[in-house]
Image (spheres, coloured by chain):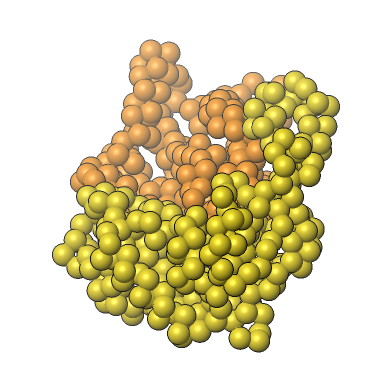
Chain colours: A orange, B yellow
Amino acid sequence: MRNLEYYRDLILVLTQKELKVRYKNNVFGYLWSIGHPLAFAFVFFVAFKVVMKIQMEDYSLFLIAGLFPWQWFSNSVVSSPTVFIGNTSLIKKVNFPRHILPFTMILQEMIHFILSIPVIVLFLFIYHKSPSFSWLYGIPILLVIQFMMAYGISLMLSSLNLFFRDLERLTVIFSTFLFYFTPIIYSESMVPKEYRYLINLNPLSPLMISWRNLFLNGVLEPTDLAISFAYSLIALILGYYIVYKRLSWKFAEVL
Amino acid sequence: MNEPIITFENVTKSYHLYHNVIGGVKNFLFDIPKAISSIKNSRFEALHNISFEVYRGETIGVMGRNGAGKSTILGLIAGVLKPSKGRVSVNGRISPLLELGAGFNSELTGRENIILNGVLLGLTRAEVINKMHDIIEFSELAEFIDQPIRVYSSGMVARLGFSVAIHTNPDILLVDEILAVGDVEFQKKCYKKMLDFKKKGVTIVLVSHSPDDIEKFCDRAIVVVKGEIGDIRRIASKPYFTNPESAFIRGMVN
């Protein structure tokens, strides 16, 4: 019982810290966290709609519905490699559950994402659409799936980076790859038929497609949901049991 | 004084030298066989087959030169390191005194950092809040406590850290050279607090370079001595037990 309370407090206090640090120094903290995906949306809109004349209605809404959840994922992944390195002195001295560090990092990014949902709603209204009731269960389900995915990957990257210190650079390159191979700035129906089977080989695709379908049409496709849940479970098991559990007792040695 | 609270049984601790791997994924993949063999072969033995017991309520000093293995012993007690051979058992709640500002965030206020640090050291949030008043009072930082600690001097940060650590109700207090910080007045206060702890039956492990500190506080001292230099396989460290006879300790250290 005390243990449970301790875990809860540890998560609470560390997440509070992250949020305070992020928002304390400037009143624009909130604007920063939505400004980044909005700026991206603007760039893609100019490049693909204005210049290349992509055939799609409401393209800016389409972009935002995909870019916001992606931002959560990619921020989590890119900051993963430094999670443990950034807490060296603590890890070397105090025996606390280390996996709490990536956990709270992702929780914090999730909170930013949740706070950015009103912006999506705003864009829906601009295009004369409105949020659907299915959001009430759809958003929590997708939050859990994406949390598992991000946490699993983050445990892998943060642990391995202590042993392979250049993983940080590879992560940035890898996440750029993943972004362009995931249907975010284009829809899955625009992918040529002969390559379409490849879409679901990318663990992020069914998840990002689900988010967009939920935000734009209020629909959750059970197949997408099942596939993305399976991928997330694999990521979590791989990250926690295969990588983190085996390496964590060595952290204090290699830092 | 009869119940062992810390037991080291034939403990050997060796480290892999990971420099080849820390060269990164690139180096590792380009030369896998060499990388693997270098991981297997390059080991550094920091502690060699040491055994000792520390009893409840005892204050024990750990001394030795840089690199002798003092920090490894502390790491093993704190449970952040695992022995390569042998067994370490610790029965009680440990509070390490962290080096300057570890676990603190410079953007948060003193008060927020107390909560953060207290929870990291194993208290629940409610417990830290209960002790908040005592912690602030002991640190003598009441007027700065709602300022971000980036405006604190290093001595003030050390005072805050010490204050939190001693208020976590530890059974075992690990002190690693921490007393060198803070002004003379505060140092005196820390010493006094440690003597209080001793009276209350808290076990203290004190790592220090200073034979004076060890003599002043400790019931016993372990002197960790590094073996010959240059012979990588046999860098052995042996413990010596002694009552704090200054001549002997000084002889071992110098």
Taking the spot 25% from the left edge, 51% from the top edge, the residue there is B153
Vertical side of A209 occupied by A172: above or below = above
How many numbered markers are drawn? 0
Taking the spot 38% from the left edge, 56% from the top edge, the residue there is B180
B219 relative position to A111: left or right: right
Q: Specify the quadrant that holds the N terminus of chain A.
A: bottom right
- Residue A162 percent coordinates (x, y): 61, 40
Is there any visible trace of residue A115 in the rendered image?
yes
- Depth check: A78 or B163 in front? B163
A223 relative position to B155: left or right: right
Taking the spot 74% from the left edge, 25% from the top edge, the residue there is B29
- Residue at the extreme top of the image, as rendered: A51
Is there any visible trace of residue A241 in the rendered image?
no
- Residue at the extreme left of the image, as rendered: B143
- Residue at the extreme front of the image, as rendered: B247
- Residue A49 percent coordinates (x, y): 39, 19
Taking the spot 43% from the left edge, 13% from the top edge, the residue there is A52
- Depth check: A199 or A177 in front? A177
- The quadrant in which residue A159 appears is top right
Vertical side of A2 occupied by B50: above or below = above
- Depth check: B85 or B213 in front? B213
A193 relative position to B65: left or right: right
- Depth check: B116 or A17 in front? B116
Q: Specify the quadrant that holds the C terminus of chain A.
A: top right
- Residue B107 percent coordinates (x, y): 29, 50
- Residue A21 percent coordinates (x, y): 32, 50
